[in-house]
Amino acid sequence: MVRFACLLFILASPLVWGVTVDEQLKEAKDYLTVKPSESYRILESIDLTANLTEEQLIEWYILYMRASLPLGKLDNLIDSVANAFEYHKSDYFSENITTITSALGIWLRRNNYLIDAELSFKCSYRNASNDRLRVILNNSIALLARENQDLDRAKSLFEYSARLAEAGKNINMMGMINFNQGVIAFQEKKFALAEQHFRKALDHYQSINKQSGKILAATYLLFSFVVQKELTNYQRLYSPTFQQTEAFPNVTSKALLAWVHAGYLHHIGSQINDEMRNSLLTQFKNITDHHEQKLIEKHLAKPLGISLKLPEVKVHVERFNARWFALVRQCNFNQIVHP
């Protein structure tokens, strides 16, 4: 019986079936949009200590950073960027420099290294080889402008990016840009306009079955329904959004939806008991974006009578000091990285 079980295991082995690393990497790439958690699982199953080529290693790091972002695994993202820079003189690294430095810029922005994020995005833009990459970077630069409280510039960049995305029929970016425009409208208390943008974003993400995008756009659309007291619309959208969010491994998405639903329950007259209050406070710890924290505090926590202590936003005065970041500052990747 033991021998038979071992035989079954061996026969089921991907190695026996001839699944190569290249095939695993391709499968992981194919899942990035529709199910990044599956991309992540596939990548985790690849043994990096095996005899992988330099190109395969770089590709693994790129895919790992791309899968980590929608799952909220930002530590994995920056670790992958750092590891990829070990191969900065490789031709394959050079071919993908825009993707790598763009991911780096996102991490820097989210960790409030705003000056260095701008340097990273500018270097990415300088190396962008087509309009598809340029529209992605325009979106990132617009988000950076928003972070710097320059909403007029952010809106202008989003509008320009939207035109580029529509011209290139880039559905993913059309979804992303509409979502970001919706968030700015929400910040400015233009809730009907925000709702329009969130609806468009959701439609775009649904058309390409982008799971993370569908959940985010739907949750913010629900948020706009709560603020506008559109309770019938809320009831129609909540159940499918809840099911998708529960199945998606991102604690931030679950936390935001829990707060939004508490706002809905308040509107229909349900009392928030101590257990739910404590649960919401615990969930709030999983929300790290300070813009999102402010929206929750203003539009959900205050009406619920819940006092939140918002973390102080600290923009780094000191610069990001990884030794390899000197290459990004100079946007020259053929130099020697000094210890």
Image: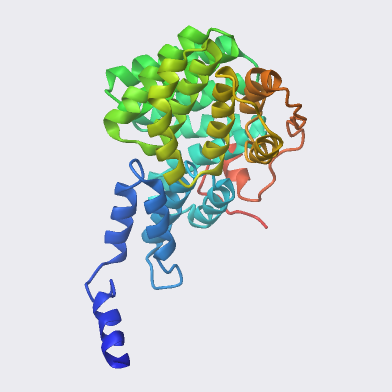
Locate residue 235, reporting x and y percent.
42, 23
Residue 162 position (above or below residue 97): above
Indicate the quadrant where residue 291 lies: top right
In the displayed image of the protein, which residue is found farthest to the left? 17
Quadrant of res 129: top left
Image coloring type: rainbow
State the residue at coordinates (57%, 45%). Answer: 74
Which residue appears at 28% of the width and 71% of the height?
14
Q: Nearer the viewer, residue 55 or 202?
A: 202
Task: Report the side of 229 relative to 33 (left or right).
Answer: right
Front position in the image: 38 or 325:
38
**Residue 110 placed where, x, y %?**
61, 35
Rendering coords of residue 127 (x, y %): 43, 34
Please tell me whether residue 295 is drawn above or below residue 282 in the rendered image: above
Which of the two residues, 231 or 215, is positioned nearer the viewer here?
A: 231
Towards the viewer: 14 or 220: 220
In this image, 17 relative to 147: left or right? left
Quadrant occupied by the C terminus: bottom right
From the image, which quarter does the N terminus lie in? bottom left
> What residue sits 69% from the left and 36% below the top?
281
- Quarter location, residue 206: top left
How many callouts does the rendering have? 0
Residue at image location 42% in from the left, 16% down from the top: 232
Position in image of residue 6 (x %, y %): 31, 86
Q: Please indicate, yes or no, whether residue 91 appears anywhere in the rendered image.
A: no
- Is residue 72 in sight in this rendering? yes
